[in-house]
Image (tube, helix red, strand yellow):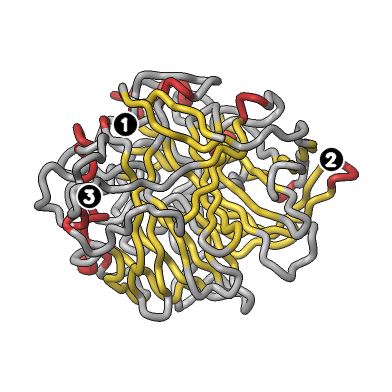
């Protein structure tokens, strides 16, 4: 059946899932010592008990035992200077004196890391059994600091407020796929980029927007210009936060977390149209691109707002040929949608919508009628609602990881932001929502 979603003054069709029996949800927690990251005290301010934030992404590799998945941490504990006072106990002008628009990194040497996780549902807990840190080809770990991207980055500050140098090798790891041979692919937010990683954590190559290769000079690993140049217009901290792929890894998928700042930040703030990409890792190029329209921010029932930039995409999962599961969320509400690439949505790869000179840009056209070359308008991906966390109060906020087990149990993992606000990692096992 179909329902109508009021979005930015428009009535848009959204495919609704047929009525199903209430899903069975099991929540897992952990007291594993490996999750402890230690204490950091801000000089003259508060002390934080930090934990490892393992939930930026998740993936169950086909063929692995049913109780095993891999998760991913992002750039490490970090606090935007604008949000620093309630966390640090210090005014931004005190702790961020060197750049009040910067970002604090209390553990600047932290390396984004893959974690092996064993699920123990009978005990309602999980444990870690492996940690694989991201590293350069020579074995030196990479950081999660910002890259030197002119006009598109923040100043990194250490836990005392001192400015740190930008790191061309740094990775803000946010999406995860593990291949049959042990390699990983990572969706990365800073570049934005797609990163191929060996089984031992060594970075093999990083695929970035065309024309930006020079901005990563000195990274110490291979840089390739395989993404559309227009992706360099991503809003700061709103790059790629997702990764999915076919089981053999021959085809990859990623989606921009939010619409691009194209032509400017004002367009980003008002836009609903973000971009889903299909990538051929052998050819090193994008082979498809579709428009995904974000929901009205007022429809996220646990934390409705008027800001169109609040909804974002934090994860993808492969459901089958031409079928993807999309995690669309705000801070406290998560919606899961199924989209299909073979049901009439317009492929815009290589068209004028990838040209930064196009006006109005895709991001300036929330109403897509009359935008197609044929005069019929661009067709965005149709969305079928699978799950809304507002119907399940036991689910945590800020869910960023999805994995699918062999019996079609859905696994959701929250990002606890390294415990900065007192959150802990929780894993939800949900049965009865996937066909």
Residue 235 horizontal side relative to residue 263, left or right: right
The residue shown at (43%, 42%) is: 105
CA gap between label 2 and label 3 equals 43 Å
Q: Which mark is residue 124?
A: 2
Give the labeled residue for mark 1.
Answer: 96
Residue 355 horizontal side relative to residue 55, left or right: left
CA gap between label 2 and label 1 equals 41 Å
Give whichever of discs 1 and 3 has the lower sequence position: 1
The answer to whether marks 2 and 3 mark residues whose Cβ atoms lie closer than 8 Å is: no
State how many labels appear.
3
Q: Which mark is residue 376?
A: none
Give SS at disc 1.
loop
Give SS at disc 3.
helix
Give the labeled residue for mark 3.
Answer: 233
Residue 137 horizontal side relative to residue 274, left or right: right
Depth order, front residue of 173/238:
238
Give whichever of discs 2 and 3 has the lower sequence position: 2
Identity of the residue furthest to the right in this view: 122
The residue shown at (48%, 30%) is: 330
């Amino acid at each position: 059946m179909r329902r109508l979603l009021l979005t930015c003054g428009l009535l848009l069709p959204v495919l609704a899932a047929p009525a199903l029996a209430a899903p069975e949800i099991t929540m897992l927690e952990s007291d594993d010592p490996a999750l402890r990251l230690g204490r950091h005290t801000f000089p003259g301010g508060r002390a934080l008990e930090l934990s490892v934030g393992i939930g930026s992404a998740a993936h169950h590799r086909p063929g692995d035992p049913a109780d095993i998945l891999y998760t991913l941490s992002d750039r490490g504990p970090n606090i935007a200077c604008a949000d620093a006072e309630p966390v640090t106990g210090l005014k931004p002008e005190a702790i961020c004196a060197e750049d009040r628009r910067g970002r604090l990194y209390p553990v600047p040497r932290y390396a984004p890391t893959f974690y092996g996780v064993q699920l123990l549902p009978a005990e309602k807990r999980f444990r870690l059994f492996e940690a694989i840190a991201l590293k350069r080809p020579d074995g030196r770990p990479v950081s999660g600091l910002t890259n030197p991207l002119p006009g598109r980055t923040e100043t990194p500050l250490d836990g005392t407020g001192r400015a740190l140098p930008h790191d061309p090798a740094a990775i803000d790891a946010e999406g995860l796929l593990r291949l049959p041979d042990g390699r990983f692919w990572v969706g990365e937010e800073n570049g934005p980029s797609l990163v191929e990683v060996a089984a031992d954590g060594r970075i093999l190559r990083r695929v970035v927007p065309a024309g930006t290769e020079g901005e990563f000079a000195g990274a110490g690993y291979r840089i390739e210009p395989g993404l559309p140049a227009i992706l360099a217009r991503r809003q700061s901290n709103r790059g790629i936060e997702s990764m999915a792929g076919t089981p053999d890894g021959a085809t990859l998928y990623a989606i921009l977390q939010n619409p691009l700042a194209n032509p400017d930040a004002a367009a980003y703030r008002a836009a609903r149209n973000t971009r889903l990409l299909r990538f051929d890792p052998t050819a090193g190029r994008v082979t498809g691109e579709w428009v995904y329209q974000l929901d009205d921010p007022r429809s996220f029932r646990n934390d409705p707002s008027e800001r169109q930039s609040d909804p974002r995409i934090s994860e993808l999962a492969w459901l089958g040929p031409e079928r993807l599961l999309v995690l669309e969320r705000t801070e406290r509400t998560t919606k899961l949608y199924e989209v299909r690439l073979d049901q009439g949505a317009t492929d815009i790869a290589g068209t004028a919508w990838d040209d930064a000179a196009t006006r109005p840009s895709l991001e300036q056209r929330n109403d897509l009628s009359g935008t197609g070359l044929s005069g019929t308008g661009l067709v965005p991906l149709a969305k079928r609602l699978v799950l809304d966390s507002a119907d399940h109060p036991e689910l945590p906020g800020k869910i960023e990881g999805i994995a699918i087990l062999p019996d079609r149990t859905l696994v959701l993992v929250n990002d606890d932001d390294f415990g900065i606000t007192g959150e802990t990692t929780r894993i939800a096992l949900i049965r009865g929502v996937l066909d």
